[in-house]
C-alpha cells in the first residue's frame, strides 16, 4: 500500500513539474528586460550636429566624426563630470521633415541643447537624416535596445561606427 502511495505521488509531482515548466510566459513578463524608455517617443526637440575634434566625450570614449553617436542634453545625461547610465544606450531618431531615420549610440553630453528632447549628433549621424547646410532639424526619438533597433542587446562594446539608417521607407523598426 505504501509503495502504491509513493509511486502515485511521484507521478503526480512529475506531471505537475512538467505542466508548470511548459506553461507559456505572459507577454508582459517575457519582455521585462526591455528598458522602461524603450517604446516612448519623445517629441518637440531638434537635432543639431557637432564635431568631436579628437576629444573624448562625456562617456569617456574618443570617436571619429563619422561614428553614429549622440550627445544627450544635460537635463537627461545628468552630472557631466560622471559617466551617465545613458552612455552606450541607443536612440532611434526620425527627422520630421523627411522621415529619414538614424540609430545612434549615446556617447556624450550636450550642455548647449536648449530642450531636454533635443539631441546633438555626430556629423556622420546627422548627415544620414539631414544636410550639413540645414544645421538643425525637428525630430522625434526613442530609446531602442541596440543599433539595429531590435530588442537584442549589443554586448560587443564596439564604439566605432555602429549604426543604422533608413530613408523611412522600411518599417522594420
Image (cartoon, rainbow, N blue to C red):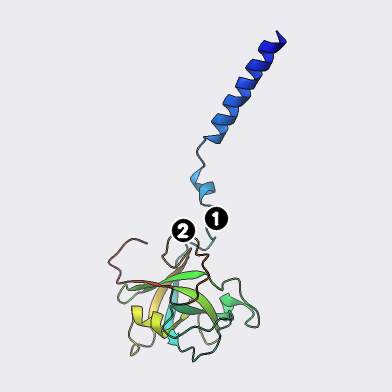
Position of the C terminus by quadrant: bottom left
Q: Relative to 152, is 16 on the left or the right?
A: right
Q: Position of residue 135 (x, y in %)?
A: 38, 88
Q: Between residue 115 and residue 59, name the one nearer to us.
A: 59
Q: Position of residue 29 (x, y in %)?
A: 54, 47
Q: Position of residue 165 (x, y in %)?
A: 35, 72
Against 160, residue 54 (above or below) is below
Q: Which residue is mark 2?
A: 151
- Please identify the residue farthest to the top as the structure is shown: 1
- Please identify the residue farthest to the right as the structure is shown: 2
Q: Are marks 1 and 2 in contact (CB under 8 Å)?
A: yes
As drawn, the label of residue 139 is: none
* Total marks in image: 2
Of the two numbered discs 1 and 2 on the same chain, state the one appearing first in sequence. 1
- Alpha carbons under labels 1 and 2: distance apart: 9 Å
Q: Between residue 126 and residue 63, name the one nearer to us.
A: 63
- Residue at the image point whose x is 56% and y is 74% from the top: 87
Q: Mark 1 Cα within 10 Å, few/some/many (few <14, many 20+)?
A: few
Q: Relative to 8, is 143 on the left or the right?
A: left
Q: Position of residue 42 (x, y in %)?
A: 46, 69
- Residue at the image point whose x is 44% and y is 68% from the top: 147
Quarter of the view holding residue 92: bottom left
- Residue at the image point whose x is 54% and y is 30% from the top: 19
- Residue at the image point whose x is 47% and y is 65% from the top: 146
Against 26, residue 44 (above or below) is below
Mark 1, secondary structure of its residue: loop
Position of the N terminus by quadrant: top right
Mark 2, secondary structure of its residue: loop
As drawn, the label of residue 33 is: 1
Against 132, residue 91 (above or below) is above
Q: Mark 2 Cα within 10 Å, few/some/many (few <14, many 20+)?
A: some
Amino acid at each position: 500500500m505504501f509503495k502504491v502511495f509513493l509511486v502515485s505521488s511521484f507521478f503526480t509531482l512529475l506531471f505537475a513539474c512538467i505542466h508548470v515548466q511548459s506553461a507559456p510566459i505572459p507577454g508582459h513578463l517575457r519582455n521585462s528586460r526591455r528598458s522602461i524608455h524603450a517604446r516612448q517617443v519623445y517629441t518637440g526637440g531638434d537635432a543639431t550636429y557637432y564635431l568631436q575634434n579628437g576629444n573624448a566625450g562625456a562617456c569617456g570614449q574618443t570617436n571619429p566624426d563619422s561614428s553614429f553617436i549622440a550627445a544627450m542634453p544635460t537635463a537627461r545625461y545628468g552630472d557631466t563630470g560622471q559617466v551617465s547610465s545613458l552612455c552606450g544606450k541607443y536612440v532611434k531618431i526620425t527627422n520630421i521633415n523627411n522621415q529619414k531615420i538614424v540609430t545612434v549610440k549615446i556617447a556624450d553630453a550636450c550642455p548647449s541643447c536648449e530642450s531636454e528632447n533635443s539631441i546633438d549628433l555626430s556629423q556622420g549621424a546627422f548627415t544620414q537624416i539631414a544636410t550639413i547646410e540645414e544645421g538643425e532639424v525637428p525630430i522625434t526619438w526613442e530609446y531602442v535596445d541596440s543599433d539595429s533597433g531590435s530588442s537584442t542587446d549589443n554586448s560587443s562594446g564596439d564604439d566605432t561606427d555602429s549604426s543604422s539608417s533608413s530613408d523611412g521607407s522600411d518599417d522594420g523598426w
